Image: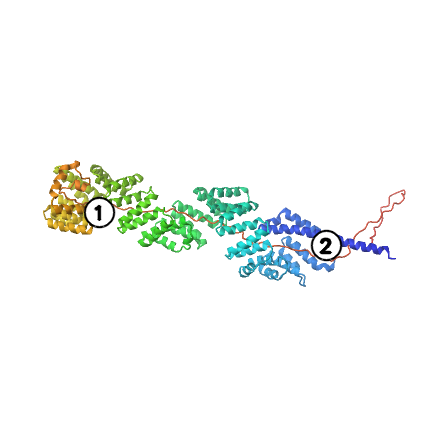
Amino acid sequence: MRHPGFFSACFVFLFSGIVSAQSFRKCEELLAEAQQGLNQAFEQNDLSKLKSRAYLRKLHKLRKAYSAYHRAYFDEGDSVAKANNEAVLLFLGRQYGKAFHQLSMVRDPVPLLEYHKGLSLLGQGDYRRAAGLLQKSAQENASLNALVALGKLPEPADGLALARRYGGSQAKGAYNAAILLERAGEKEKARTYLDRAAGQSESAWYRIRRADLLMELGLTAQAAADFEAFGRKMPGGTVRMANAYMVLGQYEQAKALFDAYLKSGDQHYRAEASLGIANSMYSLGEYETARNYYERAATHTSTRIGGICGLGNIALVENRYAQARKLWELVLSRDSTNRSALRGRAISLYGVGDYDGALRGFEALVGEADMPAAIRADLLVCRGYSYYNTGQPEKAARDFQQAIKIDPSWFEAHAGLGMIAIDRRKYPEAGKHLLAALAYEKKNDRLWTNYGNLLMHFDMYDKAFSVFKTASELNPNSLNAQNGRGITLLERDLLPESKALFDSLVKTNPGKSFLLNNRGIVSAYLGNRASQREEAAVANKSYTRAQNDFEAAMASAPEKKFYNVNKGNVLRYWQQYEDARDSYQSYQDKSALNNTAVLLAGLERLKDAKYYMGVALQIDSTHRAFQYNMNLLANGRSKETAKFVASARDDGPYSEISLKYSLDGYVTIYLYDYLYERILFKGRHQAELPRVAFTDDYLIPEFDFSFLPYSPKEKQTNVKKRSVRMPRTKGKRSRSGTQCPVF
């Protein structure tokens, strides 16, 4: 018969094994809780959570439980397990280097410990050695963590290769592979991996990162759906959602979300939110508020460039080109390839009149074809005028035409083509372009003035009168508009009003040759009218004033030879025929030929007159005055016509003053002087908004440490001695006694 002590010993041994297993299981449960907190910190890229009370409380409970387990069940044969377990605790306490050192104390390689060494190296940032150990491991998450280690290396090739062939089932592994593929520009394949990660996990972060990628792919509506569904579950989600609204043009909604985030007190995305709300304010035209937020964004490292770019955009919109140029130069000193800064600097140079510098700036710009339509059109217009102002009309015309093709409403481009056509003397084409420009822009006095000048070129004085009236109302100080108004008053036979206007203009702008010339023409017509009324003295005074103005105009601008034609007309009225003919011959154009023919006709040299008139008609066969004069010469009826015109006076049938005030029946041509305005469009400076870039494309490891249990053994326990009731004795109670262990 066996001794009862044997059964007692077996029972105690089995019981201690059960207790040991339960104690170890408790340690594993607490380890799982602590590792969950650890991994959450890495998933949210917020390692400050490892200092939180919640995490430290979990870690404390784990240490306490493990300490009790260790005291109860460790012996010298458990050194490997002890080294592993203590290393795990060190790692959880963020002592990554000590954890690796502890694991390295084990001489013989143990697969699990080798994997743990790889995780420890990953934690302490020794990514190359970590990748080597993790790639050799057969643990479930080894490949996932190897992706993280390889992705942290400066050479992306190995990590990218592993990402391309990654076939793990873990959502986190698919996410890491997607990040590496996205960095390499393989966005469609990255999207496939992110779809897999989002399908395998309820993590809001995977969906937010998928939405980020959809934004990069231009699928903003799909991205917005993900942001709306999951954005509020993570701190940066609302900022991303607002950014999507910006791309969709929903600026008010974006502004509200950015503002709500900034008021929330969260600090993680404050810089991005400041830049985002600045963009929304800029898009809504609230430039002063936008400037304040751009200045805030410029104080943060991550958004400094974006903030300065935003300030540069506002300076361009406000036409503060010198200030804008300084801002763009500052951006380029930090990032010489920044496209917004290259474009902005070129436009700033255009704005300050440095057209050669602007063209050099435009040449350095790449990616023009990828720009949004409005931004590209503005660039083309500014570059077109830079070409135009540097004597390159062909290139200018090409840019203007491309701008119109993008958006026909760019009146600046129509106006530019009109000016090129005027320079080439293609007046019908010029009129078409200026009229198109005025269809979109009715507040530009220079456009109206140039269009009025064109109408005068085609002798359309009645229409030109209303055009110059509009130009003068828009800008009463426009000298060229007032000049045109004076000419059209003359052509409407409002001679006193025209004379009064030119007197005023000459007085306030002395020495302007075109004003003197045109006032001289008014005086000449007043002289003709007085002659018709047989007021010889009045006529002579008017002719003298006209002659003085023509002489003064020629002295002021000797290069304008056509003034000689007008001077010759007055000399002819004074019957100084040789001097008049010499004056005409000093400017041999069709008008001078016509007036020479009229002079010869007055001298009864009809054959010579017909010759000169014929030459004029060869130059311009459609000119009505030439046709009229040739018809008179052919019929020989000029004297009868002259008598009829003179006797009719203001009641005659002729509305054109060249006929109404003709003294010989022929049309004598005067040459008006008018100047086309130089078009100086500031442009409509649309800008690419500074991109709100999120730099948290981080890789996420999976720290899945395991404790190793100590080998099963008998636990040394204390068993209480069964108490025996003793008879009471007098005196003091005995408190002595010994508790003996039960084996």
x and y percent of residue 395 in the render?
Answer: 33, 54
Is the image coloured rainbow, by chain, by secondary structure, or in one colour? rainbow
Q: Which residue is mark 2?
A: 70
Q: Residue at x 68, y 49 (%)?
A: 61
Looking at the image, tell me whether mark 1 or mark 2 is earlier in sequence order.
Answer: 2
The quadrant in which the C terminus is found is: bottom right
Q: Residues within 10 Å of mark 1 (few under 14, many from 20)?
A: some
x and y percent of residue 10 in the render?
Answer: 81, 56
Residue 608 is left or right of residue 468, and the answer is left
Q: Which residue is mark 1?
A: 556
Q: Secondary structure at mark 1?
A: helix
Front of the two marks 1 and 2: 2
The quadrant in which the N terminus is found is: bottom right
Farthest left residue in view: 604
| Residue type, label 1 | Ser
Q: Secondary structure at mark 2?
A: helix
- Residue 531 showing in the rendered view: no
Relative depth, front residue between 546 and 229: 229
Q: Residues within 10 Å of mark 2 (few under 14, many from 20)?
A: some
Residue 104 is left or right of residue 426, and the answer is right
Q: Residue at x 78, y 56 (%)?
A: 714
The image's mark for residue 147 is none
Relative depth, front residue between 70 and 432: 432
x and y percent of residue 340 in the render?
Answer: 43, 51
What is the quadrant of residue 524 in the picture? top left
x and y percent of residue 590 in the render?
Answer: 19, 50
Q: Considering only vertical position in the picture, is 505 above or below 418?
A: above
Q: Considering only vertical position in the picture, is 288 above or below 701?
A: above
